[in-house]
Amino acid sequence: MKREVRINEKRLQIEIDRRDSGWSFHIDGKPVPADVIELSPGIYSILLGGHSFEARVQPHGTRLEIEVGTRRIAAEVIDPRRLVRGRHELALEGRQEVSAPMPGKVVRVMVEQGQPVEAGQGLLVLEAMKMQNEVRSPKTGLLERLLVKEGQAVNAGDALAVVA
């Protein structure tokens, strides 16, 4: 996933790749060696340069509030897939693949393939570390493909559904 992020008026190109073996990061094209574990939604344990950090990330639309220890960082994600018109944010365009944010087990599927869905509507419930997390639709559209079933184990980054 590539994104342009603005932090304190400085623009950075950030690429994050989540795989079974972990995460890899590139900032402005340069690799950044770091180990990241998502402890729970929005809370990350980060090992960077021999130092350990806990980061709490709260999204607010395209803005992120990041808290690391006593330090607060405001970041803005500049996502070319989103357009802003006045105060209303338009939905993502084109097919959007919904992927598992963490490894876990699908405990409930809330929609059927071919069903219309709204942006933010719950598609399924994923259980990870005894916590249940609702996976939501990124856009209004049609649930084109449902790629998992109840009881199925998934890895972080696995495709769960496609919304068109």
Image: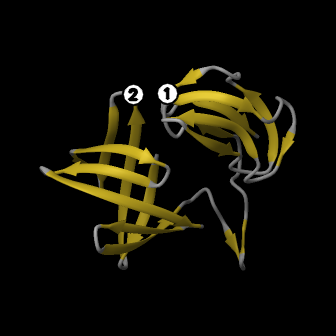
Vertical relation: 69 (above or below) 158: below
- The answer to whether residue 107 of the structure is visible from this angle is yes
Residue 46, percent across and down? 28, 50
Pick the front one: 158 or 110: 110
Helix, strand or loop status at disc 1: loop
Q: Are marks 2 and 1 in contact (CB under 8 Å)?
A: yes
Residue 89 location, quadrant: bottom right
Specify few, some or many for label 1: CA neighbours under 10 Å numbering under 14, 14-19, or 20 or more: some
Residue 132 location, quadrant: top right
Location of the C terminus by quadrant is top right
Give the residue type at disc 2: Asp
Q: Which mark is residue 19?
A: none
Residue 141, percent across and down? 81, 46
Residue 75, percent across and down? 42, 70
Give the residue type at disc 1: Asn
Mark-to-mark CA distance, 2 and 1: 7 Å
Residue 57 location, quadrant: bottom left
Vertical relation: 133 (above or below) 108: below
Which residue lies most toward the right here?
A: 115
Residue wearing tag 1: 155
Write the residue at 66% across / 65% down: 83
Q: Which mark is residue 20?
A: 2
- The answer to whether residue 30 of the structure is visible from this angle is no
Write the residue at 52% across / 35% down: 128
Specify few, some or many for label 2: CA neighbours under 10 Å numbering under 14, 14-19, or 20 or more: few
**Colouring of the image:** secondary structure
Q: Earlier in the sequence, mark 2 or mark 1?
A: 2
Write the residue at 37% across / 51% down: 44
Pick the front one: 31 or 49: 49
